[in-house]
Amino acid sequence: MSFKEKFKNIILELNSMDINDSYKHEELWKKEVEIVTEDINETIKYLKNECTSEEFVWLSEIFREIIEICPSREFVDELYKLADKYPDETKKYNIMSFIDEAAGYLKED
């Protein structure tokens, strides 16, 4: 299964889960982190070309976890671009603070 298929499937699962089921939410987060960090370059390519506003919102929940596993300046830069692309969602869900937090985990060379 391709990255795109796996990622879209996990988003569908997140959308269909009971919002009160914190255990399921945690398990889906873990799966999402695994999928996204499996090949960070493929993830970045997807973000650049195909990521929807809804996917961006779901992804924002795990930015820090992604950066801890795959510390990528290019990934963070793409998140800032998506924040510009989806300003309403970025504001509504306070996504900029999540991006800034993730960026803080990058080591400066």
Image (cartoon, rainbow, N blue to C red):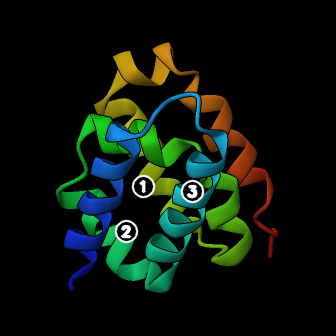
- Within the image, what quadrant is residue 10 found in? bottom left
Residue 96: x and y, percent? 58, 31
Residues at circles 1 and 3 in contact by the CB criterion of under 8 Å: no
- How far apart in space, not on screen, are marks 3 and 2 (Cα)? 18 Å
Q: Is residue 96 above or below residue 10?
A: above
Q: Are marks 1 and 2 in contact (CB under 8 Å)?
A: yes
Question: In the structure shown, which secondary structural element does the residue marked by tag 2 occupy?
Answer: helix
Disc number lying in front (1 or 3): 3
Q: Is 46 displayed left or right of 25 in the figure?
A: left
Looking at the image, which residue is at 40% across and 45% down?
14
Residue at mark 1: 78
Q: Return the residue at label 2.
A: 44
User: Which residue is painted at 20% across and 71% down in the image?
Assistant: 5
Q: Amino acid at mark 2?
A: Ile
In percent of width and height, residue 108 lies at 81, 68
Residue 91: image location, x then y, percent? 49, 16
Number of on-image labels: 3
Horizontal side of 63 relative to 41 (left or right) equals right
